[in-house]
């Protein structure tokens, strides 16, 4: 099962879960995580259901390419990290 790990920065707002999912796409895995932990949705997705500008997702060490459809493929052993993007200099 793919393993989703959410940023520890969210810990100041809520318990930060790690979620296992058998989903084949990032969107489906996120939907499973949000069904179990609805409060996460607003921190990860905007009102249109797109990835927020300040959030970045890495799948097996590679940055997810699709920020709107979130249809990147997952493998059964994928590690998915969902974190806040950092900016500044």
Image: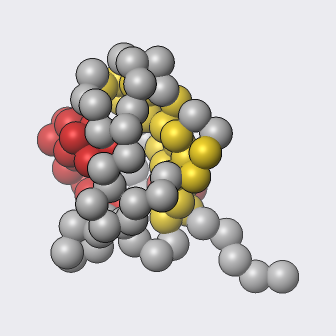
Image-based side of 47 in relation to 85, left or right? left
Residue ranking furthest to the left: 35
Picture layout, residue 63 above or below residue 75: below
Q: Nearer the viewer, residue 41 or 56?
A: 56
Q: Residue 45's quadrant in the figure?
A: bottom left
Q: How is the image coloured?
A: secondary structure
Residue closest to the eye, 12 or 72: 72
In the picture, which quadrant includes the C terminus? bottom right
- Judged left or right of residue 32, residue 61 is right
Residue 11 shows up from this direction = no
Residue 28 in view in this figure: yes
Is 11 on the left-hand or right-hand side of 67? right
Q: Position of residue 5 (x, y in %)?
A: 49, 37
* Placement of the N terminus among the 4 image quadrants: top left
Residue 42: image x %, image y %? 28, 65
Front residue of 13 and 20 = 20
Specify the quadrant of the image occupied by residue 32: top left
Q: Is residue 84 above or below residue 2?
A: below
- In this rendering, the answer to whether 56 lies above or below 76 is below
Identified at 48% across, 58% down, the residue is: 65
- Where's residue 31, x and y in %? 20, 44
Q: Residue at x 51, y 72 (%)?
A: 54
Residue in the picture at 52% in, 30% down: 79
Residue ID at (31%, 67%) = 68
In the image, residue 65 above or below residue 15: below
Marks counted in the figure total 0
Residue situated furthest right in the rendering:
89
* Left or right, residue 37 beside residue 51: left
């Amino acid at each position: 099962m793919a393993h989703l790990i959410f940023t520890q920065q969210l810990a100041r707002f809520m318990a930060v879960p790690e979620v296992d999912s058998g989903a084949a796409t990032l969107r489906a895995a996120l939907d499973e995580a949000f069904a179990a932990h609805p409060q996460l949705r607003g921190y990860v997705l905007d009102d249109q259901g797109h990835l927020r500008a300040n959030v970045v997702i890495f799948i097996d060490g590679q940055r997810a390419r699709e920020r709107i459809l979130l249809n990147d493929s997952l493998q059964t052993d994928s590690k998915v990290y969902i974190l806040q993007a950092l900016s500044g200099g």
